[in-house]
Image (spheres, rainbow, N blue to C red):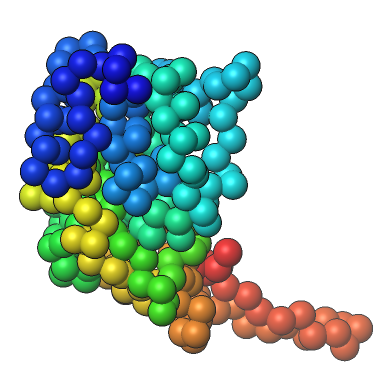
Amino acid sequence: VLRRFPGASLAIGARDERVIDVLNQVGHPVFGVAGPHFRAMGWSVFPQTRGINTRTPGIADGRMITYKEWVATLPPERLVAHWAAVCPGLNVAGIMGPATGAFAVDIDVTDRPLRDRIYAIAVEEFGPDHYVRSSGGVKVALILGIDPADPVEAKRALPLLDAEGRSLDGQAVEILANGSPLTVYGRHHRTGERFTYGRLNPIRHGLDRIARVGAKSVQRFLERVDAEVVRLGKVKQYDKGAPFVATGEVEAATLGADGIVTPGGRTSVRGVT
């Protein structure tokens, strides 16, 4: 692969800047250089297209690449090198889950004040050590390590709702885990803007630099966003050991003429899936 891209480097450490220099060249292949580099740093990755409406795995050997088998196991480096040779221009998609040892909190929110408040709670709950990915707009995604003692396994999109329970223009907070792909390097599929990172950059800083977060922390984060910032459509019970408390008005049970009791219900129950 390196012979095809003079000046590129897949080394880890002080020479990482050479990889970044190559990626910053306009029109230069992304997966062709960054794919093997991410794999060498412990990421489970595959090449991903940049279609306006769809993002799919690339084509290798006449077939679409399948990535589900690389959720729990890292793809062989030789396989990633082959993908880099045949799909050099595609984005790098990271597979969230146990192989990479990471999951993501995608704050898919276009309202900047709302985004800032949600992100502030994320930092309070998860700490400052995470990759935060953006592409020039308001939306951001946090990539965090998985705590093996309390793994985040559920993936879910939680829509933001207004006071009447209607979706806020399709905005959501998404938990990407257990096989969910996330574009970790390249360009946004709609805007064409390059993805950038904050203080920690995955192409420079290893996965050991990000905090390991458990499901209980994710649960607290979602509950705080729901209570303090904006109503969420569904608050997934990531902490399986926690007692579930439904909310909403309780309807009284009724006794029919035939003596059959019809139990009451809740007109609005949140958090049930």
Q: Residue at (35%, 17%) from the top-left corner? A: 89
Residue 100, image quadrant: bottom left
Q: Which residue of the protein is positioned furthest toward the right in this rendering? A: 258
Please state the horizontal and vertical placement of residue 105, each as a whole percent of the image: 32, 54
Residue 208, image quadrant: bottom left
* Front position in the image: 136 or 74: 74
Q: Is residue 92 visible?
A: yes
Residue 167, image quadrant: top left
Please state the horizontal and vertical placement of residue 195, each as a whole percent of the image: 22, 32
Quadrant in which the N terminus is drawn: top left
* Above or below 205: residue 194: above
Q: Which residue of the protein is positioned furthest toward the top in this rendering? A: 27
Please state the horizontal and vertical placement of residue 267, each as a whole percent of the image: 55, 68
Please state the horizontal and vertical placement of residue 38, each as a whole percent of the image: 31, 41
Q: Residue at (20%, 30%) from the top-left corner? A: 9
Q: Please indicate whether residue 64 sits to the left or right of residue 133 in the image.
A: right
Q: Please indicate whether residue 22 sits to the left or right of residue 80 in the image.
A: left
Q: Please indicate whether residue 168 sits to the left or right of residue 202 in the image.
A: right
* Front position in the image: 239 or 158: 239
Q: Is residue 54 visible?
A: no
